[in-house]
Image (spheres, coloured by chain):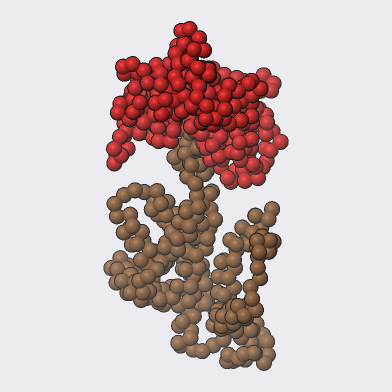
Amino acid sequence: MPSTRAGRPRSIGWGLRLWVTAVAVLLLAPTLVVIPMSFGAGQTFAFPPKEWSLRWYEEFFSSPQWMSSVVTSAQAALLTGVLATVIGVAAAIGLDRGRFPGRELLRSAMMAPMIVPGIVVAVAIYGTFLRWHLNGTLLGFVLAHTVLAVPFVITSVSTSLAGYDSTVEVAAASLGASGWTVLRRITLPLLMPGIASGFVFAFVTSLDEVVIALFLQTPEIRTLPVQMYDSITLEIDPTIAAASSLIVVVTTVALLLPQLVRRRRSES
Amino acid sequence: MRPSTAPTSTSHGIRISGVSKVFPGLPRPAVDDVTLDVAPGEFMTFLGPSGSGKTTTLSMIAGFTPLTAGSICVDGEDISRLKPHKRDLGVVFQQYALFPHLTVTKNVAFPLQQRAVPRADVEARVRAALELVGLADFADRLPRQLSGGQQQRVALARAVVYQPRALLMDEPLGALDKKLRDQLRREIARMHRELGMTFLFVTHDQEEALTLSDRIAVFNNGRVEQVGTPNELYERPSTLFVAQFLGESNVFADDGAEVVVVRPERLELHAEPGAVPDGCRHRKAVITDIVYVGNHHRIGLRFADGTEGSVMRLAGTALPAAPGESVVASWSPRHQAAVPRPAATWGV
């Protein structure tokens, strides 16, 4: 018994394999169907397409409306990623090291956006931002999305902190490093895997957020998901298939990138 | 080791005066009014059981734990309110505490970079420090690619490369297995000779303390019971705790408020009271067991008053009696140490 366990991981049974495949197909198929559809040549959605073409991609990239929403989404996602990472890393370290009354309450409050229904957050933000004149501004999208994204950063950085021996910080101090140097040269580099995946989660959270963005949009400024939503409700047109395919590819790459980088680094 | 590249340092003394540490919520102080003088270049060991306050005292010297009372001076300068990174002391931890994301070279260079040492000097000094601990060939490895013993050597190199005013070590051999522990212990002794630096060493292992130290401070219940050379502590313990913590002891009730401690190798065994030499003191005993311990026999005794004791005999000498037989144990008063009878708990 122990020899087989030590030799190689026991392969999973056929029944389980079948089940996992079925679940994966069920989850992924609708998303993947959209990709061949986006290469169709017909005027309406067809799967599989009778003829192939890039016309919907041409439509997509030549439309000022689609393009401006792509730019807005990219800007909002990048800025949200940076802002949420800075706030989330500081919060995770503070919640891990701090010994103050109300610490658990504060943690719950910061994690709340994960639990509170999106529509409730959206209405509240809409009302507040009306007063602050933030509706229809890039800053408004970034601030709202940061609130949603911070819990993801806190979660992934807290996971890194859980397996982290802080004796190295004490050692660094004894060797002459000030508190700031310890943070910069020891703590942050050691937490980098958690920080990087936190950033990616924050980026993706902003990129595919639609409910709040619907409330904050104006005809002049809207994000890509909102543009997609509008295009579905107003006119059915396979351009949206092209847009969807692009978003699927971008988010998949963003989520896989840290893992690929980590695997390459551990191999070298 | 070429003298030109060897880390050298002028030695510094440490004075610990009336230092106490009270942790809120604990019934007694972790460290209770400790005063110690560590001479420049001395190898001093804090020896004691866990919870005796030795590690807390070291942590206060390093600056990781704030003092409740007292002061700590290095060469007359009060450092007790300084942050750890301003104290210029080297610290070695039980679990090595190497930076896992930096190579051996970068670990050892770290303290030099904090001191803005020119790049060319950094390289030479890192190499010299790694040669000192015999790890020059491992400069580009990451800590996780090294064994525990090698990691602790890197930690030692890192803690002396900047010539700190003293090297503090908190159970540095505690995480290693027996063979590596003995090997690294000899390395630490050699480093002390070569560097001439003041070493403070914390351990609960009496063998480490006896073999390494110039002087030992024995800690118990947050206090220093006795400070002295290994020989003084062994031959002239001033408390029963010291006598029993360091080596084995036979403890005999004496007149008044004192008990008498005699080491096992100082006892002689005789068949009858008449054979006891003039001027020697003696007690009747029964041999309980005889154990062969490599180079000597340990003969277990039960004295007439019911207390247990032991005699040590080198292997190869004739054994005086067999288990179950009655004997008389004698010793010269020159070889006894009288210590205060502990309050209440000692029921001789």
Which quarter of the rendered picture does the N terminus of chain B lie within?
top right
Hue of chain A?
brown
Quick check: A94 above or below B31?
A: below
Near-viewer residue (A178 or B243): B243
Q: In the rendered view, does A95 fall on the left or right side of A159?
A: left
Q: Which chain is painted in red?
A: B
**Residue placed most toward the observer, B73 or A191:** B73
Residue B187, horizontal then vertical, whole percent: 62, 27
Q: Please tell me which residue is depicted at 54% across the width and 82% down the height of the picture.
A: A240
Q: Residue at x 51, y 89 (%)?
A: A236
Residue in view at x 31 percent, y 59 percent: A105
Q: Nearer the viewer, residue B224 or A219?
A: B224
The location of residue B270, given as percent across then percent down, is 53, 17
Residue at 56% x, 42% y: name it: B99
Can residue A90 be seen here? no
Give the residue furthest to the top: B278
Q: Position of residue B324 (x, y in %)?
A: 52, 30
